[in-house]
């Protein structure tokens, strides 16, 4: 499985941004997709994930109510809609996927910078 993210950039506090991730390869084996982020000097943390059933989602407490994850199984894509962005959301955001065998796959990451 190969993952490619897009949509990062520089925004101001309070702005919105949408990240997208396209999967290729053995996409039929993907059971869950998600987004992680890693801020400078911090460990990578889960932002949100979504299982094959698009209604099954999970969010970090820090983004609940501001971020929304969605998935298009037919296109093998996952998106993260982010609202009310704050400087503490600044990080490299990584797309992830888990397959039927429990293997994890990662994209190269896309940088989101929230600054005035």
Image (cartoon, helix red, strand yellow):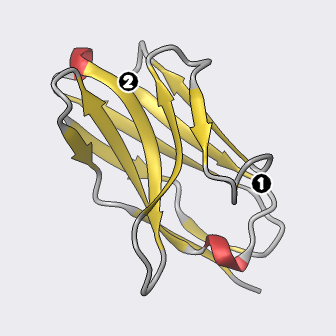
Q: Position of residue 2 (x, y in %)?
A: 21, 39
Q: Position of residue 19 (x, y in %)?
A: 54, 49
Q: Which image quarter: residue 9?
A: bottom right
- Residue 83: mark in rendering: 1
Element on which disc 2 rests: loop
Q: Residues within 10 Å of mark 1 (few under 14, many from 20)?
A: some
What residue is at 46 percent from the left and 23 percent from the top? 51
In terms of depth relative to the viewer, which is nearer, 15 or 104?
Answer: 104
Alpha-carbon distance for marks 2 and 1? Answer: 23 Å
Q: Position of residue 13 (x, y in %)?
A: 79, 74
User: How many numbered badges does the structure rendering display?
Assistant: 2
Quadrant where the N terminus lies? top left
What residue is at 50 percent from the left and 30 percent from the top? 50
In terms of depth relative to the viewer, which is nearer, 95 or 44?
Answer: 44
74 shown above or below 1: above
Mark 2, residue position: 76
């Amino acid at each position: 499985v190969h993952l490619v993210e897009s949509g990062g950039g520089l925004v101001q506090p309070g702005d919105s941004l949408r990240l997208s991730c396209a999967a290729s390869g053995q996409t039929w084996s993907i059971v869950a997709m998600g987004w992680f982020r890693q801020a400078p000097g911090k460990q990578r943390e889960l932002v949100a994930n979504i299982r094959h059933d698009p209604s099954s989602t999970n969010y970090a407490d820090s983004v609940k109510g501001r971020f929304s994850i969605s998935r298009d199984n037919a296109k093998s894509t996952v998106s993260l809609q982010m609202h009310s962005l704050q400087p503490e959301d600044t990080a490299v955001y990584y797309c992830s996927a888990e397959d039927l065998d429990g293997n994890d796959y990662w994209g190269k990451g896309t940088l989101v910078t929230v600054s005035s």
